[in-house]
Image: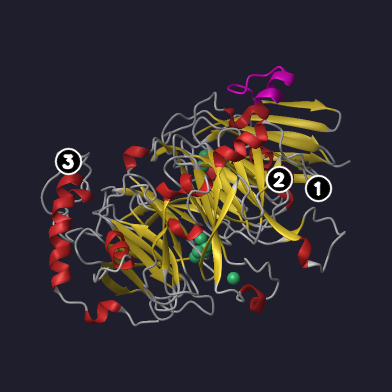
């Protein structure tokens, strides 16, 4: 493999790039950046003058003045921490955490009845491994409705409502063994959530086959993003790593690093090429509609057989070697697979895919470039100006390269497609640029999620932080502007503009989130908005409380030892940010109750005595006094 081509790159390449960029930025300025002008130095980042206004070459400032707002939202996955983190970019301030597969001491996620209803049977698991987070789309653009995430550890997919930034749906995917790659349909609308089964296992995996890898397979799953119903699966050859969707809505594609269907490290590296599996979503839908599918014992999800070279559902495009990420260019033209063990990326022309499925062209005819980029390409992102940015895990670099130039080079022209290589710290995995997963990629900021931080921060013991680095890509050259330590372990992130979201400042009283509590109140003949009472039914006791700073509606309530107690608390405050909580000492009970929200929690009153309950959010000068007593009569 040849060495890093930027080492001897003539500086003229940058000048040429600059001219191209300036032409491009004028167009960016025309769409949606109106009214903002000038250089964004410190202080230019105000609410009325977004940072993206400045595009005359790396004039962006990472500094957001006190009281000023960030110009992008970031949604960070958190790997084995199991949550989603909401960030402000470019300040890299953490704004919120959204518990999903983890348990949360502050909000009561995993303990409240509302969260347990979302978790369903999978509440048996206290943890998860959340790698990828993607927003719902309409016509190739973020539409601000939902985030979709997956759990590699316990084979789940979940949805987050972006109005309240809480998880509202979770499904366990049958037949798959670890969900890894997750992407959503980009057009016309989400649509499907696509989920890759990573590890190969027997189908069904019920013990009848054990150490017999010839019976091991994986499946690709399509989930309805509205109902979160699992609509179908495709039985595939090899395994599935990352995936992506095109911008037409017809195709999805996944990388496979285990075409060998091996079970050891050596097995999985035997072939020089693995593949990108392309899925024809329309063909899958047609087969499912016409009943042309099987089911696998233990689940009734329709499964179509996508193994083999000429099924109507799949095509296996050979690519070198143990590929990892796959990323669609914002113009919809290409899907770029990252070589990992090969120093290359493979550029697949999406417009050739219909011909491939019609058997008019060969598998490799869809490949229009295979640029050599450096060691360990993992993921690629885009600036909307024709450039791609790829992480080089082994080289600890981000390489900026031009896609059309790489295609010209592949066609035999003598052209240097590498624009720049930038050292990052260290061993980068995912990277993402602002809006780069959408048709609106705006080429302002790039975040690279480095796996190792080594010496970049004060030492904190053997578990080092990861390092989320911020790079200004608005000019010709990438400029590293910020190091962001992060706890285990952001794999991926996306960024969108604030105008693409519409988070609710307080809850609406008719929110479906506490449907169960509403039903209980109806059964008990009480009104949730005013109820302040204890309703007993045998040894089941429901305690209805309201909260208005700095008081609960009852100073005390009495139950009997052994009762199953459900406490239902409604926060009647309408003031933004006036959250209360409800916690009972030595009962391990604690939950959030935000303005206009109803939250509930069920436990057994197994210990007699006096137990104080108290508010957990510092809501008022008399917050410490916002408390009451649960009196548990001995049995
Ligand atoms: Cu590359 Cu799980 Cu997206 Cu991590 S995956 S880096
Ligand atoms: Cu209510 Cu503190
Ligand atoms: Ca392989």
* Residue 281 in view here: yes
Residue at the disc numbered 2? 611
Mark nearer the viewer, 3 or 2: 3
Whether label 2 touches label 1, CB < 8 Å: yes
Boundaries of the magenta span: 518-531
Is 24 on the left or on the right of 203, as rendered? left
Q: Quadrant of the N terminus?
A: bottom left
Percent across and percent down for residue 313 are 60, 46
In the image, residue 287 lies at what x, y percent?
A: 65, 36
For marks 3 and 2 on the same chain, the one whose residue lies earlier in the sequence: 3
Compared across the picture, whether 418 is left or right of 216 comes to left
Task: Say left or right for 423 vs 45.
Answer: right
Element marked by disc 3: helix
Quarter of the image where the C terminus is located: top right
Q: CA distance from mark 1 to mark 3?
A: 67 Å
The disc placed on residue 30 is 3
Query: Which sits in the foreground, 126 or 616?
Result: 126
**Displayed quadrant of residue 63:** bottom left
Q: Is mark 2 within 8 Å of ligand 2?
A: no
Residue at x 12% of width, y 54% of height: 39
């Amino acid at each position: 493999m040849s060495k890093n081509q930027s080492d001897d790159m003539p500086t003229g390449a940058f000048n040429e790039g600059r001219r191209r960029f300036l032409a491009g930025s004028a167009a960016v300025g025309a769409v949606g950046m109106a009214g903002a002008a000038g250089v964004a130095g410190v202080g230019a980042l105000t609410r009325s003058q977004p940072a993206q206004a400045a595009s005359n070459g790396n004039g962006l400032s990472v500094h957001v003045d006190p009281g000023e707002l960030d110009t992008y939202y970031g949604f960070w996955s958190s790997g084995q921490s199991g949550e989603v983190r909401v960030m402000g970019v470019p300040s890299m301030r953490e704004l919120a955490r959204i518990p999903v597969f983890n348990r949360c001491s502050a909000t009561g996620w995993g303990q409240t009845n509302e969260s347990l209803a979302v978790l369903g049977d999978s509440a048996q698991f206290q943890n998860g491994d959340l790698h990828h987070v993607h927003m719902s789309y309409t016509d190739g653009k973020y539409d601000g409705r939902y985030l979709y995430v997956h759990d590699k550890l316990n084979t789940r997919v979940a949805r987050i409502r972006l109005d309240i930034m809480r998880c509202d749906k979770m499904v366990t995917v049958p037949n798959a063994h670890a969900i890894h790659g997750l992407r959503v349909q980009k057009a016309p609308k989400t649509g499907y959530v696509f989920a890759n089964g990573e590890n190969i296992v027997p189908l069904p995996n019920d013990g009848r086959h054990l150490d017999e890898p010839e019976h091991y397979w994986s499946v690709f799953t399509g989930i309805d993003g509205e109902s979160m119903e699992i609509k179908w699966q495709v039985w595939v050859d090899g395994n599935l790593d990352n995936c992506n969707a095109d911008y037409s809505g017809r195709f999805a594609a996944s990388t496979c690093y285990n075409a060998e269907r091996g079970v050891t490290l050596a097995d999985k590296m035997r072939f020089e090429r693995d593949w990108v599996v392309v899925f024809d979503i329309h063909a899958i839908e047609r087969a499912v509609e016409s009943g042309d599918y099987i089911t696998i014992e233990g689940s009734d999800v329709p499964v179509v057989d996508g193994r083999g070279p000429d099924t109507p559902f799949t095509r296996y495009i050979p690519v070198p070697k143990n590929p990892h990420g796959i990323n669609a260019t914002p113009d919809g033209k290409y899907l770029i697979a990252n070589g990992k063990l090969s120093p290359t990326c493979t550029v697949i022309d999406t417009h050739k895919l219909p011909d491939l499925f019609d058997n008019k062209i060969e598998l490799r005819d869809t490949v229009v470039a295979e640029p050599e980029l450096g060691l360990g390409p993992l993921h690629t992102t885009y600036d909307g100006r024709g450039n791609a940015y790829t992480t080089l895990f082994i080289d600890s670099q981000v390489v900026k390269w031009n896609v059309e130039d790489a295609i010209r080079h592949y066609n035999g022209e003598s052209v240097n497609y590498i624009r720049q290589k930038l050292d990052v710290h260290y061993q980068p995995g995912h990277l993402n640029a602002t809006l780069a997963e959408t048709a609106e990629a705006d080429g302002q900021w790039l975040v690279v999620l480095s796996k190792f931080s080594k010496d970049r921060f004060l030492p904190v013991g053997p578990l080092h932080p990861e390092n989320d680095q911020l790079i200004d890509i608005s000019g010709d050259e990438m400029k590293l502007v910020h190091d962001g330590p992060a706890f285990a372990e952001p794999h991926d992130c996306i960024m969108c503009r604030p105008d693409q979201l519409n988070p609710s400042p307080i809850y609406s009283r008719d929110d479906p989130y506490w449907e169960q509590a509403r039903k209980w109140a109806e059964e008990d003949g009480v009104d949730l908005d005013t109820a302040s009472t204890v309703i007993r039914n045998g040894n089941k006791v429901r305690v209805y409380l309201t909260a208005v700073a700095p008081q609960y509606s009852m100073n005390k309530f009495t139950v009997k030892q052994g009762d199953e107690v459900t406490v239902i608390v409604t926060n009647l405050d309408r003031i933004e940010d006036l959250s209360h909580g409800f916690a009972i000492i030595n009962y391990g009970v604690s939950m959030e109750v935000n303005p206009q929200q109803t939250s509930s929690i069920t436990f057994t009153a197994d210990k007699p005595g006096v137990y104080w309950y108290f508010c957990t959010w510092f809501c008022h000068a008399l917050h410490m006094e916002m408390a009451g007593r649960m009196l548990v009569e001995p049995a």
